[in-house]
Amino acid sequence: MKIKSILVTSIAPMSDHAANRGEKLLGNASSVKRRPDGRVYISGQMQRHVLFSAIERLNEDHPDKGDTYVANGDGPSTQIDKDLRSDLGGFLSTSKGDYSGRRTAPVSATPAVAIKPSSIGRDLLVRLKMNEAADALQRQALATNEFSTQDEMVQSFHLDVGAIGVVKEYSYKDESHVGTQYKSFIDDKEHHRRVKLFLDATASMTDYANQARNAVSGEPNKVLIVLDNKLSRKASRFFQPETTDAERQNILKELKAREAKVFLGDDTSTDGLSVAEAYQKAAEALTLDQLYRPNYE
């Protein structure tokens, strides 16, 4: 079986958090993002930010890092051979004016959404004016910040394995598209390394931007990892509260029928695999000869 895509869906417990604040209400009152049904959520943009922060941290420590790096989110390059954000996260460079200036991201993420309606608290922040001088720049201020007390957040990530490290080049004749070729910028070993970095990063979600001084973690206590022989995101429904037990069983049955490799980990139970064991077994299954790559030049 050739692995064409990897889907990781998981549940991460978060407490007393505002991992993705929304717009401000009533002046300085900063609100957490929540859906009309009362469940807080973390945007897909924030989830990708945290994922690439984890990839950068893992890449810096990797013995085969070479000259690869992860560009800042506000300045990705178009060098997919070196810049992991450019390769895995895509880019749009309008200055190039042709197909070479845009790339569809092999990595995609869903927003993280609480399983149950959230209980929102408010924290009063006071900044005292210590200097009594009339022209002092530091003014007294009051602000309230919202936070969510306790949530189980469902999050999902998907990787198009065959799109890593390659670009499509198109052939035209008389203004008609007559062929597509693939050009690779990395070898098979580096391709395997980047797939493994993605998998490991989904278990290392910690860098939530608005929570730099608080220990908010998106590290899961339940996970479903699917190494699939087709591009599918259906299993991202597995932990959603709307999904019934019958649907979950049928999702697993469908994956088994097409011989996808499935690893289910649960830290809340002593039966079956733990989360760490599920990741370990999934990593062991990622062998060079099993990762799909299109025929390239």
Image (tube, rainbow, N blue to C red):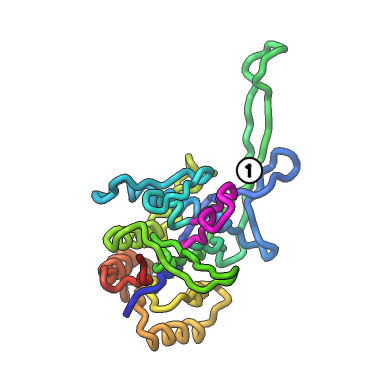
Q: Looking at the image, which is closer to me, 26 or 20?
A: 20
Q: Mark 1 = which residue?
A: 145
**Which residue is at 52% across, 61% downward?**
104
Give, as a three-letter code, the residue at label 1: Asn
**Residue 138 as seen in the image, left or right of residue 219:** right
Q: Quadrant of the N terminus?
A: bottom left
Residue 186 part of the magenta-drawn span = no
Residue 91 part of the magenta-drawn span = yes
| Residue 134 visible to the viewer | yes
**Residue 275 as seen in the image, left or right of residue 24:** left
**Which residue is at 56% across, 63% downward?**
113
Q: Quadrant of residue 205?
A: bottom left
**Which residue is at 59% across, 50% downward?**
94
**Residue 44 as seen in the image, left or right of residue 158:** right
Residue 30 in percent (x, y) is at 66, 44
Residue 291 in percent (x, y) is at 32, 71
- What's the magenta region? 90-107
Disc 1 packing (10 Å; few <14; some 14–19; many ≥20): some
Q: How many marks?
A: 1
In the displayed structure, 236 sits above or below 257; it is above
**Which residue is at 46% across, 83% downward?**
251
Q: Looking at the image, which is closer to me, 170 or 220?
A: 170
Q: Looking at the image, which is closer to me, 82 or 122?
A: 82
Residue 81 in percent (x, y) is at 37, 52
| Residue 153 visible to the viewer | no
Q: Residue furthest front?
A: 174
Q: Looking at the image, which is closer to me, 87 or 32?
A: 87
Could you tell me which secondary element the residue under label 1 belongs to? strand
Residue 19 in percent (x, y) is at 54, 50
Q: Quadrant of the C terminus?
A: bottom left
Q: Quadrant of residue 137?
A: top right
